[in-house]
Image (tube, rainbow, N blue to C red):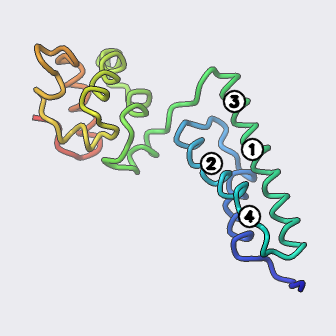
């Protein structure tokens, strides 16, 4: 049984992949990589048993393109020894769900950022928070920890400045 139309799933994969390959992101961030890998994994793991020969051929081509794009991103990572920081606009669009580790890389707040870069990883581990919204819901005493062991005043100031950028109430 052969049809002249493309299977809806194959067409959707093609459109989503086209956005990545026709205008590739020059400096992919970890967030970009995560989104792309979700798409790549959906394409690669798609069960093509119910597809006709033409759709199977199209899906095979999409799988190849997805693997090539993943390789391009891997080359960027190797050449730059890491991912690019996520753009501020992308993080602001995420609102309170923006990941803290990306905020530390992308939001420079004067001399406070170096303190935040050192102390935020420990704060995240101790409080088990991932996003700025989860962190903002905590109190200053929680974030600082006993005797300000986790974070000092400069990191608390950085958190307050980032919360202002996002329009959310900072820890009190």
The C terminus - image quarter: top left
Dot 3: few (<14), some (14–19), or many (≥20) neighbours within 10 Å?
some
Q: Which residue is mark 3?
A: 76
Using the numbered discs, state the Cα–Cα distance from disc 4 to disc 2 in whole angstroms: 13 Å
The CA span between labels 2 and 1 is 9 Å
- Residue 42, placed above or below residue 171: below
Q: Mark 4 Cα within 10 Å, few/some/many (few <14, many 20+)?
A: some
Mark 2 touches mark 3? (CB < 8 Å):
no
Q: Is residue 24 above or below residue 16?
A: above
Q: Would you name the residue on which mark 1 appears?
A: 69
Quarter in which the N terminus is drawn: bottom right
User: Left or right: 114 with respect to 13?
Assistant: left
Q: Would you say the residues marked 2 and 1 are in contact, meaning their CB atoms lie under 8 Å apart?
A: yes
Which of disc 1 and disc 2 is earlier in sequence? 2
> Within 10 Å of the Cα at label 2, are there few (<14), some (14-19), or many (20+) other Cα atoms?
many
Q: Does dot 2 land on a helix, a strand or a loop?
A: helix
Residue at point 58% right, 30% down? 83
* Residue tagged 2: 36
Q: Earlier in the sequence, mark 2 or mark 3?
A: 2
Image height of 11 relative to 171, above or below: below
Tell me the CA gap for discs 3 and 4.
23 Å
Query: In screen coordinates, is 72 left or right of 85?
Result: right
Q: Which residue is mark 4?
A: 14
């Amino acid at each position: 049984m052969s049809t002249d139309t493309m299977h809806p799933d194959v067409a959707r994969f093609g459109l989503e992949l086209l956005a990545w390959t026709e205008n590739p992101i020059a400096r992919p961030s970890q967030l970009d990589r995560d989104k792309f890998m979700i798409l790549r994994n959906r394409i690669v793991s798609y069960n093509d048993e119910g597809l006709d020969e033409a759709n199977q051929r199209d899906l095979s081509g999409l799988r190849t393109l997805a693997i090539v794009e993943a390789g391009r991103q891997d080359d960027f990572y190797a050449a730059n020894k890491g991912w690019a920081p996520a753009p501020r606009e992308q993080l602001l669009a995420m609102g309170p769900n923006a990941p803290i580790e990306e905020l530390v890389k992308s939001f420079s707040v004067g001399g406070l950022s170096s303190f935040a870069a050192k102390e935020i990883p420990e704060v995240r581990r101790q409080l088990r928070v991932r996003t700025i919204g989860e962190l903002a819901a905590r109190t200053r005493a929680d974030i600082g920890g006993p005797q300000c062991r986790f974070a000092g005043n400069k990191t608390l100031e950085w958190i307050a400045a980032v919360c202002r950028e996002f329009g959310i109430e900072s820890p009190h």
